[in-house]
């Protein structure tokens, strides 16, 4: 049984983690899409009840489900009501108060690829009426999780299942199947994450080290479950979530690597017979396995590098960026590294944080998602697209302000049923036009 004493005190006065600590975590992340740190903290389990409440929302662009929505069971109110939207205590905040507060910060958001009305969002807000007696941190801050199956026409509230002052929090939300959302806790290498079902049930997964087979959607990046927090290593790899047993299975070597030596594999066991990726060095050095034998190729110094997601099975691709000329060089191989094809594509502007994806049609998508500007403050994103034979990217989406927070370790692009997702952004025409899901409370 988890120790609930510390959980009950979470609602008292919890301060946000220092921004510098989060940045230190982020610096250890892979250069592929920035950040997977191994911190030794153990997530604190929070047992909270669920309530179903009606809250107003603004209309926003919401795509139709790819598959029919999973029916939601009848919910009943319990003794944890979420509380009123106006405060009843001078020293704390209810869950609903946190979510409803106008100056609340969106910490993390996730959406079901099967039914976009099934969403989860974590919010944080300072308590403006609480005593300000803990300088220099200022007034206490509180966190809450908002869950919906109808696009926030109604809301379920839960306490967050980690200590926000001690732990870096969830790194992404994965949609592993209908009626399921996986809150990945990769910032804590000894936590396999939490599985959220569309009835509001939140389950801390058990961990196992075993290479299993499963659909590509069920795989996600994870830290080493057997990692020693005191050891000078950073094991990362791929994990498969099993909703029937509430277990996360971490694939064994060579899918599990020491990130201080190798970059993590760019593909999961569902996408390739053997892993490939980038070495964690300053040069552009792809690595791949052939018959269990490790191979590398050094293409020389590079200022910014990454792998291309979405490659067909049996093919691999890496990219490097020349910031002076703003030219992206993509090198691909489908013959075990012999030979490599080279393609150069001009970028419309200098990116701050770049991810590249190949769509099923062969077009290239690029996401400039930027880095965290301040605590819980993220810059607007841009999406660029280049046809298979184009020599430059076109700007296809620019947002004026950030509409969702997919997490600093989230997969940049995911395709399902002819639709492309990038966080809460979606496209039904191979990335030519994009729409945003805007309602997260």
Image (spheres, rainbow, N blue to C red):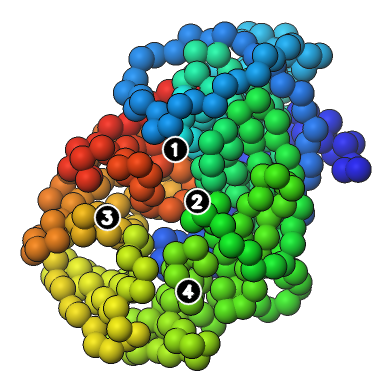
Instruction: Tell me how far mark 1 sits from mark 3, CA to CA.
Output: 17 Å
Residue at (14% x, 66% y) in the render: 345
Query: From mark 2 to mark 1, how far is it between C-alphas?
Result: 10 Å
What separation in Å lies between label 3 and label 4 (alpha carbons)?
19 Å
User: On the image, which quarter does residue 256 sit in?
Assistant: bottom right
For residue 130, side relative to residue 240 (left or right): right
Please name whichever residue, 221 or 122, is drawn nearer the observer in this view of the structure. 221
Residue with the mark numbered 3: 360
Instruction: Check residue 273 in the rendering and tell me which mark sits there, or answer none.
Output: 4
- Residue at horizontal 85 percent and vertical 39 percent from the top: 6
Q: Are marks 1 and 3 in contact (CB under 8 Å)?
A: no
The tally of labels here is 4
For the residues bearing labels 3 and 4, Cβ distance under 8 angstroms = no
Residue at image position (14%, 61%) is 388
Q: Residue 154: image x %, image y %?
A: 55, 14
Q: Is residue 431 visible?
A: yes
First of labels 2, 1 by sequence position: 1
Q: Nearer the viewer, residue 331 or 27?
A: 331
Mark 2 and mark 1 residues within 8 Å of each other at the beta carbon: yes
Of label 4 and label 1, which has the lower sequence position? 1
Q: Is residue 126 above or below residue 301?
A: above
Q: Earlier in the sequence, mark 2 or mark 4?
A: 2
SS under mark 3: loop
Report which residue position mark 2 lands on.
217
- Disc 1 or 3, which lies upstream in sequence? 1
Sooner in the amino-acid sequence: mark 3 or mark 4: 4
Q: Is residue 51 above or below residue 110?
A: above
Foreground mark, 2 or 4, reads 4
Q: Residues within 10 Å of mark 2 (few under 14, many from 20)?
A: some
Q: Which residue is mark 1?
A: 113
Q: CA distance from mark 2 to mark 3?
A: 16 Å
């Amino acid at each position: 049984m988890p120790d609930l004493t510390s959980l009950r005190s979470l609602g008292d006065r919890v301060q946000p983690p220092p921004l510098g600590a989060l940045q230190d975590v982020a610096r250890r992340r892979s250069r592929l899409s920035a950040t997977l740190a191994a911190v030794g903290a153990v997530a604190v389990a929070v047992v909270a009840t669920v309530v179903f409440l009606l809250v107003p929302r603004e209309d926003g662009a919401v795509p139709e489900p790819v598959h029919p929505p999973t029916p939601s069971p009848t919910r009943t109110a319990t003794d944890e009501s979420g509380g009123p939207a106006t405060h009843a205590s001078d020293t704390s905040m209810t869950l609903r108060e946190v979510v409803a507060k106008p100056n609340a910060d969106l910490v993390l958001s996730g959406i079901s690829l099967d039914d976009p009305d099934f969403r989860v969002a974590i919010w944080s807000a300072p308590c403006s009426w609480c005593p300000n007696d803990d300088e220099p941190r200022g007034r206490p801050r509180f966190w809450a999780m908002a869950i919906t199956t109808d696009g926030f026409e109604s809301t379920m509230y839960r306490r967050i299942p980690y200590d926000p002052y001690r732990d870096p929090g969830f790194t992404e939300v994965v949609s592993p199947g209908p009626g399921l959302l996986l809150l990945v806790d990769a910032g804590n290498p000894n936590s396999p994450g939490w599985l959220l079902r569309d009835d509001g049930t939140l389950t801390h997964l058990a961990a196992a080290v075993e290479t299993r087979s499963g659909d590509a959607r069920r795989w996600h990046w994870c830290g080493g479950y057997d990692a020693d927090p005191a050891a000078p290593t950073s094991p990362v790899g791929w994990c498969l979530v099993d909703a029937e047993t509430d277990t996360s299975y971490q694939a064994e070597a060579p899918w599990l690597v020491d990130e201080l030596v190798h970059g993590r594999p760019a593909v999961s066991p569902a996408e390739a017979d053997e892993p490939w990726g980038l070495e964690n060095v300053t040069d552009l050095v792809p690595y791949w396995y052939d018959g269990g034998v490790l191979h590398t190729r050094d293409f020389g110094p590079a200022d910014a590098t990454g792998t291309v997601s979405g490659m067909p099975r049996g093919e691999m691709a890496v990219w490097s960026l020349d910031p002076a000329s703003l030219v992206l060089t993509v090198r691909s191989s489908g013959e075990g590294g012999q030979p490599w094809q080279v393609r150069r594509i001009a970028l419309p502007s200098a990116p701050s944080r770049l991810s590249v994806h190949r769509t099923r049609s062969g077009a290239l998508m690029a996401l400039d998602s930027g880095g965290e500007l301040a605590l819980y403050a993220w810059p607007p994103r841009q999406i660029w697209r280049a046809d298979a034979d184009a020599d430059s990217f076109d700007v296809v989406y620019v947002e004026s302000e950030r509409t969702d927070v997919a997490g600093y370790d989230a997969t940049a692009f995911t395709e399902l049923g002819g639709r492309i997702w990038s966080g809460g952004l979606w496209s039904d025409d191979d990335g030519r036009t994009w729409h945003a899901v805007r309602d997260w409370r």
